[in-house]
Image (tube, rainbow, N blue to C red):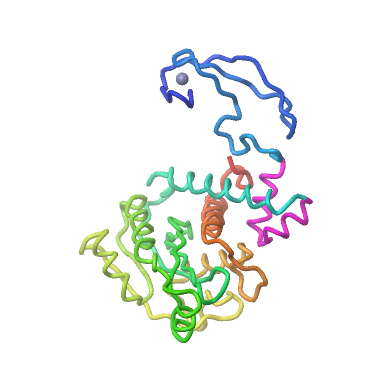
């Protein structure tokens, strides 16, 4: 299909090649649209469009998804940190595009989704005084991530006055972000009959607004985390929110800056968002046993 006029009926014909200096594809096919007379190539709209190091894109994605930091990626692949950062932005945008392009049939696969668990996990940017929340919703049956979004939030407890003094008032994006995540659940899981979460007082209001009063919403009291799950897996007995806590523990393990007691920190919230979208996509690829889960297209 022509990327300019986007008309599915327009005829597209081959129109020679152009040489590419980098990567393993030495020449790129050009195309011409008969309808609008404009030209494009096999690279137009591709993940590595106009990139100088297209051969590193998939490697960088795999390293970032195995708990390697951005600097660690640059060191092991012998490229610059800027290359890694640029690719992360593209990969994150691509992953978000794939996540938003899903339909309710894509995500249901074998059985329709009936129970969804949602919650927020916390991290910070630059300093503990500037916390960040990651809102996540997962399918309770198979751990598939339905939506994951990042929100800035003000510091809580003893840190709150110190944070206000140092950095001023910090906005709270959590309500808006949680509503976005639950709207995505509403769009992708039409057969949902039960929502589960912890006892956060903000949640019932969002659920009623998006799903109406009929939908059942069960809340559970939070329990103390244990050391092995990096705080997300709970101690003692059966955990009713296990699927979500397990997925959060995987986010913490696979994204370097989210792991506890690490030297790495988030410097930019938007880049954390890129990593969260990328991991959500990657996680689902592995759960659904996609044909080639290690390739971003
Ligand atoms: Zn056209």
In magenta stretch: residue 71: yes
Q: Nearer the viewer, residue 247 or 70?
A: 70
268 lies above or below 60: below
In magenta stretch: residue 132: no
Quadrant location of residue 58? top right
Relative horizontal placement of residue 254, taking residue 277 as reference (left or right): right
x 52%, y 61%: residue: 269
x 64%, y 76%: residue: 261
Relative horizontal placement of residue 3, taking residue 17 as reference (left or right): left
User: Magenta segment range?
Assistant: 55-78
**x, y percent for residue 17:** 66, 19
**x, y percent for residue 212:** 22, 60
Q: Main secondary structure of the magenta part?
A: helix
**x, y percent for residue 278:** 55, 53
Relative horizontal placement of residue 172, taking residue 76 as reference (left or right): left
Relative horizontal placement of residue 134, taking residue 66 as reference (left or right): left
């Amino acid at each position: 299909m022509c990327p300019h006029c986007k008309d599915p009926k327009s005829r597209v014909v081959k129109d020679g090649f152009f040489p590419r200096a980098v990567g393993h594809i030495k020449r790129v096919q050009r195309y011409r649209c008969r309808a609008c007379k404009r030209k494009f190539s096999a690279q137009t709209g591709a993940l590595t469009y106009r990139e100088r190091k297209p051969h590193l894109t998939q490697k960088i994605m795999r390293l970032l998804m195995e708990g390697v930091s951005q600097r660690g990626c640059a060191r092991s692949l012998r490229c610059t940190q800027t290359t890694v950062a640029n690719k992360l932005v593209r990969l994150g945008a691509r992953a978000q595009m794939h996540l938003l392009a899903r339909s309710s049939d894509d995500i249901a696969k074998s059985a329709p989704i009936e129970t969804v668990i949602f919650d927020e996990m916390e991290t910070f940017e630059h300093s503990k005084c500037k916390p960040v929340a990651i809102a996540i919703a997962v399918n309770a049956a198979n751990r598939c991530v339905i939506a994951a979004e990042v929100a800035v939030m003000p510091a809580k407890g003893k840190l709150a006055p110190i944070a206000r003094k140092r950095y001023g008032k910090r906005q709270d994006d959590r309500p808006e972000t949680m509503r976005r995540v639950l709207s995505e659940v509403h769009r992708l899981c039409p057969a949902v009959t039960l929502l589960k979460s912890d006892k956060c007082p903000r949640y019932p209001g969002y659920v009623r607004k998006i799903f109406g009063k009929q939908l059942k919403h069960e809340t559970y009291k939070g329990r103390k985390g244990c050391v092995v799950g990096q705080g997300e897996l709970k101690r003692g007995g059966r955990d009713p929110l296990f699927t979500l806590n397990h997925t959060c523990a995987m986010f913490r393990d696979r994204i370097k800056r989210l792991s506890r007691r690490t030297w790495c920190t988030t410097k930019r919230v938007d880049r954390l968002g890129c990593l969260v979208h990328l991991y959500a996509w990657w996680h689902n690829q592995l759960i659904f046993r996609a044909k080639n889960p290690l390739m971003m297209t």
